[in-house]
Image (tube, rainbow, N blue to C red):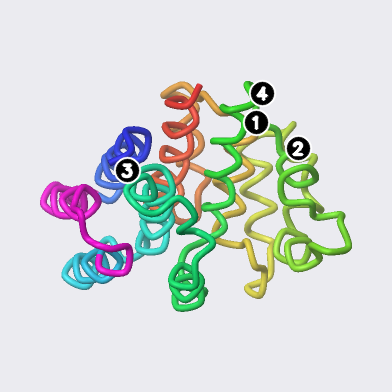
Amino acid sequence: MDKNVEKSLLACLKQFSKISRYDTTDFCDAVLVILKSHKTFLEKVADMDACFNKEPKVEILRELFFDLLLINFFAEDVKKLEEYYLDSKEWETIEEDTLERGTEILNLLLYLKECDDEEIEPELSDYLNEFLLVDDDEFQDEHHIYEDIIANQILVESSYEEIAKAAKKLPESSEVKELFYPVLSFFLDQNPSQEQLIEYTKHSMQPDFDSALYQLLITYNQNHN
C-alpha cells in the first residue's frame, strides 16, 4: 500500500472520529486490509463498499475513499500489472463501470502528486488553469464543474469565515457545493495550526466531513513535500 495514501486515510478517519465522536477503529482496520490485499481493483471496490454498507455512520466518506483506493491503485497496484495496463481494453472497461464513482478530490490528489514531482508549491490558479485546463476549449466540462470555484478564486486570500459564507450561498445544483469549503480552505492554508483547524471547523456546515477532508488533503500534501 502506498504510504502517503495510508497516512492520509488514517489522518482523515482520526479527524472524522474526533469531530463526529464515532469510533472508526474497526472500520479503519477493515479498509486497510482491503487496500493492502492482492485482489483486483474491482474486487477491492466491492469489498470497500461492503465495509461502508456495514458502517452507515461513515457513509459520507464513501466516495472520498473510492478516490483513495484509485490513487493507491495508480501508485502501487499498477506496478504489479503489465506495463501498458492503463491503456488496455480491460482498464477502459473498468473506467466505464466506475464512471459515476469518486469525487473531484481525485484530481486534486493527482495535482498534489505532480506538484511534488515538479517541486512546486500548490496554488489554486495553477491547479485550475495549468492542471485542469479550465480555460481550454477542449475542457469545458471541467470549466462547468469548477465554475463556482473559478468565480471565487479571490477567497483564497481571505479567511475560513469568508469562504464558509460563500459556500452557504451556493445553489444546491452546484457541482462543487460539498467540496467548496474544504478545497478553497486548503489553498488558503496548507499547513494550519491547531487553532486554525478549530476555527475552520467552527465555520463548517458539515464539520465531520469538512474537517476529515481538510485533514486528508493536508496530510497527503505534507507527506509528498
**Residue marked by disc 3:** 9
**Residue in the picture at 66% in, 34% down:** 159
Whether pointer 2 and pointer 4 mark residues with C-beta atoms closer than 8 Å, the reply is yes
Disc 2 to disc 4, C-alpha distance: 10 Å
Q: Is residue 123 found left or right of 181 in the rendered image? A: right
In the rendered structure, does residue 184 fall within the stretch colored magenta? no
**Residue marked by disc 2:** 126
Relative image position of residue 81 (x, y in whole percent): 35, 53
Disc 1 to disc 2, C-alpha distance: 7 Å
Identify which amino acid the numbered label 4 is placed on: Ile
Whether pointer 1 and pointer 2 mark residues with C-beta atoms closer than 8 Å, the reply is yes
**Residue marked by disc 4:** 120
Disc 3 to disc 2, C-alpha distance: 26 Å
Whether pointer 3 and pointer 4 mark residues with C-beta atoms closer than 8 Å, the reply is no
Q: Is residue 213 found left or right of 136 in the rendered image? A: left
In the rendered structure, does residue 41 fall within the stretch colored magenta? yes
Q: Earlier in the sequence, mark 3 or mark 4?
A: 3
Identify which amino acid the numbered label 1 is placed on: Pro
Task: Give the total number of marks visible in the rendering.
Answer: 4
Q: Is residue 42 above or below residue 119?
A: below
Residue segment shown in magenta: 21-43
Q: Earlier in the sequence, mark 2 or mark 4?
A: 4
Q: Residues within 10 Å of mark 3 (few under 14, many from 20)?
A: many
Question: For numbered disc 4, what is the local secondary structure?
Answer: loop
Q: Which of marks 1 and 4 is in front?
A: 4
**Residue marked by disc 1:** 122
Relative image position of residue 177 (x, y in whole percent): 61, 62
Q: Residue furthest left?
A: 26
Q: Which of marks 3 and 4 is in front?
A: 4
Identify which amino acid the numbered label 2 is placed on: Asp
**Residue in the picture at 52% in, 24% down:** 191
